[in-house]
Image (tube, helix red, strand yellow):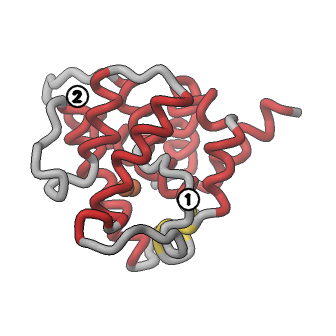
Amino acid sequence: MPEKENERLIKRMAVYGGDILRSPSFRGTRRNIQHGSVSVYEHSISVACCSLEIMDGLKGLGIRFRERELVRGALLHDYFLYDWHTYRRPKGLKNLHGFRHPETALRNAGRDYRLTFCEREIIRKHMWPLTVVPPMCREAWVVTAADKYCSLLETLRLRKGRWRKAGHIRDRRRS
Ligand SMILES: [Fe+2]
Ligand SMILES: [Fe+2]
């Protein structure tokens, strides 16, 4: 993707989710690895940017979206705030990270932000079909697809650092 397009998406994301991007809790997700060598922070930003790209494509077909909610839900979809590689959970299939982390992320996000129905759906259902019940808004479908796409590329190590420049948004604003 051209650098300018990349920058444009990141700026758009910062308009809707600047408070999240600047928060110490969200910044703390830089310390936790998500896939390969990609942090949860980088992964969440990748998913938000990818969601915007998918949304823009679908908008061209005349489909409407709540852009703010899509961005905020995408940024918070993995807001579980622990290192899932070392975190100890009770044994059992239902307690596996893949099944449990959406509810943990939702609980944390609800504690730190005022969430809309759509944002809650994005966070709670982003692991569909593991969640069984499908997403109830189109923004959640977009983030679910973006999450799977980004996760695959990160796992295959094809996407490391693509959105790292997002860090400079916060740094610039603080200086
Ligand atoms: Fe997730
Ligand atoms: Fe994710």
**Residue 31 picture location, percent across and down:** 67, 62
Query: In the image, what residue type sits under mark 1?
Result: Tyr
Helix, strand or loop at label 1? It is: loop
Residue at 78% from the left image edge and 30% from the top image edge: 173
Asked whether the residues under the numbered discs 2 and 1 touch, taking CB atoms below 8 Å apart as contact, a structural biologist would say: no
Q: Is residue 155 above or below residue 18?
A: below
Disc ID at residue 124: none
Q: Quadrant of residue 99?
A: bottom left
- Label 2 or label 1, whichever lies nearer to me, is 1
Residue at 35% from the left image edge and 49% from the top image edge: 102
**Residue 4 picture location, percent across and down:** 56, 43
Can residue 160 be seen from the camera position used here?
A: no
Residue at 54% from the left image edge and 74% from the top image edge: 86
| 3 or 36: nearer the viewer | 36
**Residue 10 picture location, percent across and down:** 55, 39
Residues packed near mark 1 inside 10 Å, few (<14), some (14 to 19) or many (20 plus): some
Q: Is residue 42 above or below residue 56?
A: below
Helix, strand or loop at label 2? It is: helix
Q: Which residue is mark 1?
A: 82
Q: Furthest residue to the front?
A: 90
Q: Is residue 63 above or below residue 30?
A: above
| 41 or 162: nearer the viewer | 41
Q: Which residue is mark 2?
A: 59
**Residue 175 picture location, percent across and down:** 88, 33
Can residue 6 be seen from the camera position used here?
A: yes
Q: Earlier in the sequence, mark 2 or mark 1?
A: 2
Q: Quadrant of ligand 1?
A: bottom left
**Cα–Cα gap, marks 2 and 1:** 35 Å
| 174 or 84: nearer the viewer | 84
Residue at 41% from the left image edge and 23% from the top image edge: 115
